[in-house]
Image (tube, helix red, strand yellow):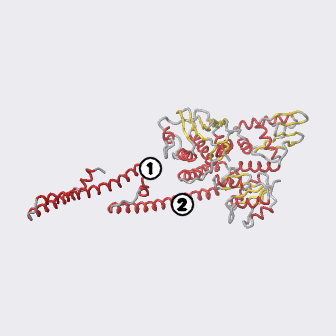
Amino acid sequence: MSVLDFLKDRLMIYFIYACTGVLLLIFMLAFRISLQTIVILNIIILFAVIVIELWEFFRRKNYYGKLKACLNELDKKYLISEMIESPNFYDGQILFEALQESNKSMCEHIAEYRHRNIEFREYIELWVHEIKLPVASLQLMCHNDNNLKYAEQLRRIDDDIENVLYYARSENAEKDYIIKEVSVKRVFADIAIKNREELQQRNVNLKTENLDVNIMTDSKWLAYILGQLMGNSMKYFSPEREPEIVISIDDLQNQQILHFRDNGIGIPETDLPYIFEKSFTGENGRMYAKSTGMGLYIIKKLCDKLGHCILAESEQDKFTEIIIIFGKNNFLKF
Amino acid sequence: MNRILVIEDDKALCTELAILLKNSGYEVVCITKFQDILQQMLQANANLILLDINLPEVNGEILLQDFRKSSDIPVIMLTSRTSELDEVLSMSYGADDYITKPYHPTILLLRISAVLKRYAKLSPVQNYHDIQVSTVKGSLIKNNSEQILTKNEMIIFQLLLDNQGRIVTRNELMTALWDNDEFINDNALSVNISRLRSKLAEFGLPDAIETRKKQGYILT
């Protein structure tokens, strides 16, 4: 709040003051009041005006200065009405109350949306659990009747259902995971068995190195992540080479690094920085397989939530390697 | 024969589960009335119980907690919920394993046989005809002569031996191998089986493993 702007704002008032002064002067001259008295009276009035204006200026400057400083420091600007006090001038108070009310209404509005969002998510989770029953029945029927054709399609349905579930989980702030020691070997074996038919059909060479370690993570989420990575690798194998997937773990002092590497078609260098972005399909997604651009995005979000770091390296026509870095923490052991 | 009690309220799933288990040589009892499940569990005289978590009127986890107060028959929890919390709860209430739907049928069978084996407390040495099978040493012993089996061969032989007299499909053998982190392919399985056959032949049992076309193998 600068003095100049304040003066500009009060221009009309000064104009009225000036008119009043001129009128007063004319009157006083008409009544033949002595010059001395006129000067004294004018000085007194001018002094009063200056004091009034200074007082008005400083109490506003004080209040709005605080407001601005507060606003600059806040990273969530909408909390400003919680941070400031009611001003001691009337027009400010009206504005303050309006701000408070608007904020309250916004909070209610957001709470309603949040509530709806939670309800939707809960419904999705419920639905996923419901739909899994018939899928489980069908899967057993296929197995009992030895029908591999349908089993393959069912596996795809199940994968898509998992995607929905984990997308819903990754989008919400709820903590529905438990971090504990997980045997990567165990989780990976389960994933491999689940995908065995397809892996064998394509004659994929699976190699594991040093998987016999425990890492701190949520086993269900890790299983989902590894399943997605395996699905991706199988989508983008190169027809020129014998397909191969290598999964290994570097067990370092403070962290464990999981490498998931395939010798598929790789990712173009220009696409590589964007592969974890939502709905990004890139050249491979358009050229080779149907891609929704959601898989890696969900994985990235899950990793962020679990506090793992995920990176990708690739060379086109040579390999793709996804690297996940897990932290070690002895306090979490139980 | 091992008797398995299935507690699952989805009828279609329950029927299919019963077929799967019967085909694998188990005796199956399904619960049809969902009142007094605890009583039925205690009276079923089963060797193993498959328990669903979402049951009408009662929660499987609480049921398990009550059941564990008076019995230590192995229980495997089946559930369509996929949260770590359920698993941790189930395990802490005394479940022996926890499998989420939709389950891979062969994984389910593997887990069941693993739990049953753990409870049967089999001695590390089993006998097949006059051959001693030592899982600890990974070898076959007959009259002071010893044949070392590779890890793969041992897994295959063990599975055939556990299911002696029943056809074991290639699919089941593969799952068992993969479950032990031996991610081998179809050809390698055939190679392993023929090696196992020749090792058995040296003990005078050349026809121990029979091939049933399009079905699998059977240990006679």
Residues marked 2 and 1, same chain:
yes
Q: Where residue B137 sits in the image (x, y, percent)?
A: 82, 37
Q: Is residue A243 above or below residue A180?
A: above
Residue A52 or residue B156, whichever sits in front: A52
Q: Mark 1, chain letter? A: A
Q: Is residue A183 left or right of residue B198?
A: left
Which residue is tagged 1?
A75
**Horizontal relation, residue A87 to residue B73: left or right:** left
Q: Amino acid at mark 2?
A: Glu
Residue placed most toward the observer, A309 or A263:
A309
The residue tagged with tag 1: helix, strand or loop?
Answer: loop
Residue at image coords 57%, 59%: A122
Q: Which residue is mark 2?
A: A119
Identified at 73% across, 66% down, the residue is B33
Chain of the residue displaying label 2: A
Q: Earlier in the sequence, mark 2 or mark 1?
A: 1
Counting other residues with Cα less than 10 Å from the Cα at mark 1, is it few (<14), some (14-19), or many (20 or more)? few
In space, the residues marked 2 and 1 are separated at their CA atoms by: 29 Å
Where's residue A167, x and y in %?
A: 55, 51
